[in-house]
Amino acid sequence: MSDAPAPQIPILDEYKLCDERTSRLEGYVWQTASLLGIASILGLITTGRDLAASPHSAALPSALGSVFGIVAALVWWRFARRWWSIQHLMFERMREIEAEAGSRMARIVHERDAEALANRRYRQLNGHWLSRTFNGYFALPPGVEPHPSARVGDYEYRGMREASRLLVYTLVVLWVCVLATSIASCPQPALAIVLLIGSLIPGLIIWRQR
């Protein structure tokens, strides 16, 4: 057998592969988030209409559907976090290649994101109560020196991850409201609660597995 080393991928080709992989992963998140949002909206409309038309008979199916909606949102969030983790590694490798080649295309975005985040945290710690309450999204009070990173101005460092987190939180809250309404409308709420707990336990066991 030959002990010849495996052929090496040219560094620029590796950079292009990393860039294509990050774009593809971003597409996965957008496409699945759109499907999750549309399916959830249709499910919320359907369950709300059924509860309004016949609350007693539709209570238990609506409750089970609510549990499924919550689980689906949380499972999607886990998949999305996995895709972002892989994407983060690809960006790290791209920055390494850029450092070797003397380029800054990906590094400058990473640096600006870090500066904008540092500026927001500084405003949060040193601002008035509104800025502390709303994560630094208000200007500093008079007399407080701005952070050196304030030069980035209104640079938007928040991306798809923050938008996706808002989507998941919103869906979970809406489904929990439907779930509470379904249990309140059920002729036997104790039975509904037992069935819901029984349906959640297998999902929690799977969720906790590594």
Image: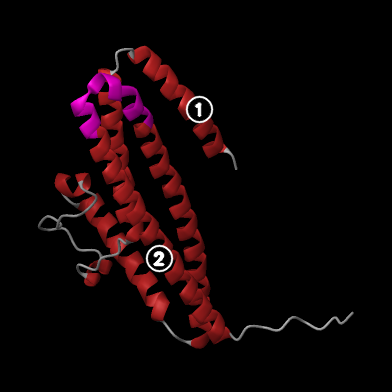
Q: Secondary structure at mark 1?
A: helix
Give the vertical position of 99 relative to 76 (above or below): below
- The residue wearing badge 1 is 201
Marks counted in the figure total: 2
Residue 49 in the magenta stretch? The answer is yes
Q: Percent from the top left, x then y, of residue 155? A: 24, 68
Q: Residue 141: horizontal and vertical position, in percent? A: 12, 55
Residue ID at (27%, 45%): 41
Q: Secondary structure at mark 2?
A: helix
The reply, left or right, for residue 86 in relation to residue 49 is right
Residue at the image point whose x is 35% and y is 27% from the top: 61
Q: Circle 1: is it few (<14), some (14-19), or many (20+) Cα within 10 Å? A: few
Q: Earlier in the sequence, mark 1 or mark 2?
A: 2
Residue at coordinates 36% horizontally, 38% vertically from top-left? 69
For the residues marked 1 and 2, what is the alpha-carbon distance in whole angstroms? 32 Å
Relative height, residue 198 to residue 115 (above, below):
above
Q: Is residue 7 left or right of residue 135?
A: right
- Callout 2 amino acid: Gly
Toward the viewer: 12 or 74? Answer: 74
**164 or 127, which lies in front?**
164
Q: Is residue 51 magenta?
A: yes
Identity of the amino acid at label 1? Ile
Mark 2 crowd level (few <14, some 14–19, many ≥20, 10 Å Cα): few
210 to 14, vertically: above or below: above
What secondary structure predominates along the stretch shown in magenta?
Answer: helix
Disc ID at residue 27: 2
Q: Which residues are magenta?
A: 48-64
Q: Is 20 above or below relative to 188?
A: below
Where residue 173 appears, x then y in whole percent?
A: 28, 37
- Return the residue nearer the eye: 162 or 122: 162
**Residue at position x 36%, y 33% in the image:** 65
